[in-house]
Image (cartoon, rainbow, N blue to C red):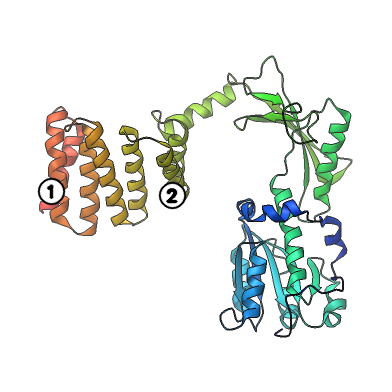
Amino acid sequence: MSKQKLTSSSSSTDVSKSQSKKTVNSSKSTTQRRSTDLPMVQNVLLVWLDEKIDEKGNHFWRDAIAEFRREINNIYTFKEADQCVLFLSKHNDEKICLIVSGSLSQKVIPTIYNLSQVYSILIFCDNKKQYKHWAKNWTKIFGIFTHSADIAEVLKDMVEMFEHDSIGINFLSMNDADAAKRALDFARDAVENPDLIGVLFNMSINPSKASTPFASISKVSSSQNTEGDILVSMFSIFRIRDMKQINGNNRLWQINLILLTNDDPELRIPIEHVHSETNPNSKGWGQLGIALIKMNEFEKARQVYKTMLEQMPDGEQKAGIYHQLGWIEDQQGHQDQSIAYYKKSLEVSQKALPSDHPDVAMSYNNIGLVYYNKGEYTKALSAHQKALAIRQKALPANHPDLAMSNNNIVKKKL
């Protein structure tokens, strides 16, 4: 492998027929766009298995990895086959492109071939003829390559396919026969990939009853291919009326949908339940954050609240966001970060609210709880005493928060 160069080979790469059907020639605009489109393919991993890999000591490997990273950001390298196979078997929620050396290909490929997450396999070697005949038996092998630049081109095409698959829903007006044909052709494209199923969604919308915004974009879009296209609100909810195979093909389906209205009882009841479960006093992003917390999706909830912080001016609502971030950090065992957020919540509350407001007491209470869990009992006791003093002024004698503060203080003194 050390003899390989980064210049493109003049000979054509040995790409399998199944790949050549799906390959899309890259335009200049696609190349320029690649660095900003990485979030579109965050679930794509590139795994490189070669017993000679040496990222630190050999510039060839460093340069090749840098070249590949321009197409796929997440790259993992392995020298040992067993470690690589274990990694592949655990990452079943991603699409994986595997580059494997010729010397390891015949050992590894039969072992991992049936893993659904392994989307494509590229053999990287010095001698294409040695593996060409054997590789024809494995349709996931996209080609045998002797130059990294050729692999980079194939990766670029793969990323375009992944982006195509990740935006696999087009809304077209079915009143137009040409648009209907385009929609069906779009679904049929997926059937060429053995790992995909083509689905045509036929959406019925009654304009006299629809409460969800929708509009034709053919007159306002900058794209030249939007004739008859419809833009539907992301909050639209459809009911599945039925589904059927298209032309008897079990990998090509049509699903007929009906847009629901806000007064639909089957829609209203679950929405009201979710609203009451997440917090009836929260709206929009705040309600989403609470829902994510209840699902134990703490990292996603953290991102939601940090985004809200950036968009919200200082005030009482910002104190609530700091409070939620403090709670998330505490749940994940990040006690110092939790205290820092609770103190920020306290600071904002003290500026925006009266000194004896119950929310100020709640901040002291939460700070005390985290200090107690850290074993810093003196600081915990001080915080709980401040919470109790405020609650004694602001709350009736039988309020449960008073009992909670008294209980916390007794526990800290024991």
The one nearer the camera, 82 or 168, is 168
Q: Earlier in the sequence, mark 2 or mark 1?
A: 2
The one nearer the camera, 54 or 166, is 54
Q: Which mark is residue 298?
A: 2
Looking at the picture, does residue 326 appear above or below residue 100?
above
- Residue 1 occupies quadrant: bottom right
Q: Residue at x 75, y 26 (%)?
A: 219
- Residue 131 occupies quadrant: bottom right
The one nearer the camera, 209 or 157, is 157
Q: Which mark is residue 73?
A: none
The secondary structure type at the circle numbered 1 is helix
The secondary structure type at the circle numbered 2 is helix
Return the x and y of residue 318 as percentages of the image width and height.
34, 37
Type of amino acid at the residue the image marks with label 1: Ser
Q: Residue at x 86, y 57 (%)?
A: 21
**Left or right: 233 as drawn, with respect to 252:** left
Looking at the picture, does residue 385 appear above or below residue 154?
above
Residues under numbered marks 2 and 1 in contact, where contact means CB atoms less than 8 Å apart: no
**Marker count (numbered):** 2
Q: Is residue 294 visible?
A: no
Type of amino acid at the residue the image marks with label 2: Phe
Return the x and y of residue 292 as percentages of the image width and height.
46, 43
Looking at the picture, does residue 20 appear above or below residue 85?
above
Q: Which mark is residue 382?
A: 1
Looking at the picture, does residue 125 appear above or below residue 186?
below
- Residue 203 occupies quadrant: top right
Return the x and y of residue 145 as percentages of the image width and height.
79, 74
Q: Residue at x 16, y 35 (%)?
A: 402
- Assign the C terminus to one quadrant of the image: bottom left
**Left or right: 77 as drawn, with respect to 106:** left
